[in-house]
Amino acid sequence: MAGYSGFVIVLTMRRVVPDFLRSKFSSRESGFNRRDLFRQGGLLSLVGAFPAFSKVNSGTSNTATKVNSHGELYRAIGVRPVINARGTFTIITGSETLPEVKQAMDDASRAYVQMDELMDGVGKRLAELTQAEWGIVTNGCCAALTHCTTACIAGSNPERMQRLPDLRGLKDEVIIPEYSRNVYDHAIRMVGVKIVEMKERSELDSGFNENTAMVYILAGEGDTGPLGTQAVSEVARRHNVPVIVDAAAEVLTIPNVHLQRGATAVAYSGGKCIRGPQSAGLLLGEKNLLQAAWANSAPHHAFGRSLKVGKEEIMGMLAAVEMWTKRDYEAESREWQKWLDQIAAKVTKVNGVTTRVEPPEGLSNKTPVLRIEWDGTRLGITGQEVSKVLLDTEPRIIFGSASGNRPYNMASSVSITPYMMMPGDHEIVAERLYEVLSKPPKFQNPVLPQGQLAVIAGQWEAQLEFGRGSATHTLIFEQDGANLVGTHRGEYVSGDLSGTVAVNQVHFRSSQKIQGTRLFFEFSGTVDGDKMAGDVNMGEYGEARWSAQRHEYQAPRGVVKPVKRA
């Protein structure tokens, strides 16, 4: 069943909450909120363990007091919850599970079962619900990819299963169209396979050989093209090679669109659109392959033993799929649009603020997005500054994107994704955005240093000191006044860099393609003759310290040459 991906909790709660409580769920000012359903189950015993958890909302009307009384469990350990206006990102814990999922997980925790019998029963029920031949629950979508890979290599042969990741004598190649390379294909590479990339349709037939274990395709842009699922599956079938589709953030289609195109199996994240447990995944497809994938996973003693899924996540995931077949997607869509309309109506009361709604496209993260735009110079605040203020203050809000920075790019915007917001969140988001845009904090343009411009051009040997470990990199700069371009060579890969220098302050960024992803580095530091030092931001990998020493270098013609120093 194709449809919208999120779930408006207030609609489902009418099925499970007595009439006299319904009104209480509709107000953030009430002392009873959606998390109370969870508290009545497995978390009820924690009220005494965390004193702050027992505090209820006082009913005051100010925004900061209304929000997130259900987050006291986290606050008790010093963690500040956020309102999710960004979407289903694992770094902010994906989605919030449905009430039925919470109940199923709590019920599942209260009895023992034999795990093979459990998955067999769940597999049958998933097949009935999804119209796939079989289904299993995994420890996330990436785990599903890993189990598929090991199943394609070792099958259900215990001797081969015990040898992994030693692939000698076994099939050890996985075909991936170039457009499908992504950071998540690490889940396949971890088995030790060789990745065979294909760029053209003409390479398809010759790409298969006796060592080909599997084909992996990332759902989305490209999966209906010359190297899309249907085209690749037709060739793979002739070679008896399974095709696995990664549809992690997609809505669950019934009957399944990817299996209809010829895929052998398709994997989903449980804690995204389907609103199941964050640590669960869903694998649908050919029964024989999926049962082999289960044999290669925990509780069995094979390569996938570390990727354990528990009985609670298994039954919670089944409950989420059960609910998927019952949810009213049109009602959810109308609710999201209503929320975005209310936010837009509020923020456009600020002169100079405009909004537009971008409709959903495709099956992945199927939700409208609200773009809020303004001139940062006119309002006195940029999009990145708005994003930081609302993340740092209470109630905390995290947006999908933000643009605009001082002093050269003041055209500003933030985006709001509604489908993981909870009822009432839109009111808080609207109010806080209006407050910050109408009466922004005071921001000053950065003060640029004055003096003679440092000469950066040349080749530098850089030492990066990580939280644990270090590495030697090479930086090659070409300089045109204050502007820098060049190359950043890491231990294994290289990429372009660009940046600026202001007197003795240097700032540059680089990007390096490696496997299915890119590594990003943002360097800031100071220059002192033939030495530089500072900090480097590596995004999700944190920060490091760096220092560099200039080496002799012959600059290209027309480029500022490094000064030869005594």
Image (spheres, grey):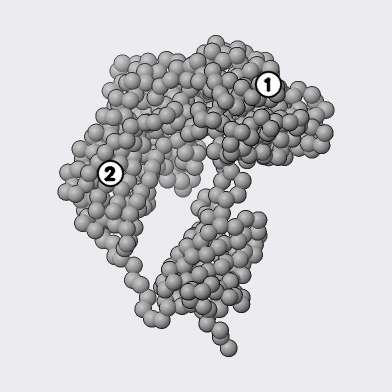
Residue 281's x, y, as percent? 56, 28
Which x, y percent locates residue 70?
40, 35
Q: Quadrant of the C terminus?
A: bottom right
- For the question of whether residue 18 can be seen, the reply is yes
The percent position of residue 111, horizontal first and vertical second, equals: 61, 19
**Residue under circle 1?**
238
Earlier residue among tags 2 and 1: 1
Q: Secondary structure at mark 2?
A: strand
For image coordinates 51% across by 61% down, the residue present is 497
Task: Measuring from the top left, give residue 333's x and y in whole percent.
Answer: 33, 25
Left or right of 159? Residue 296 is left
Mark 2 → mark 1, Cα distance in angstroms: 51 Å
Compared with 103, 505 (above or below) is below
Q: Count residues near mark 2 (Cα–Cα under 10 Å), then give few for <14, some for 14-19, many for 20+.
A: many
Quick one: SS at disc 1? helix
Q: Residue at x 23, y 38 (%)?
A: 344
Residue bearing mark 2: 372
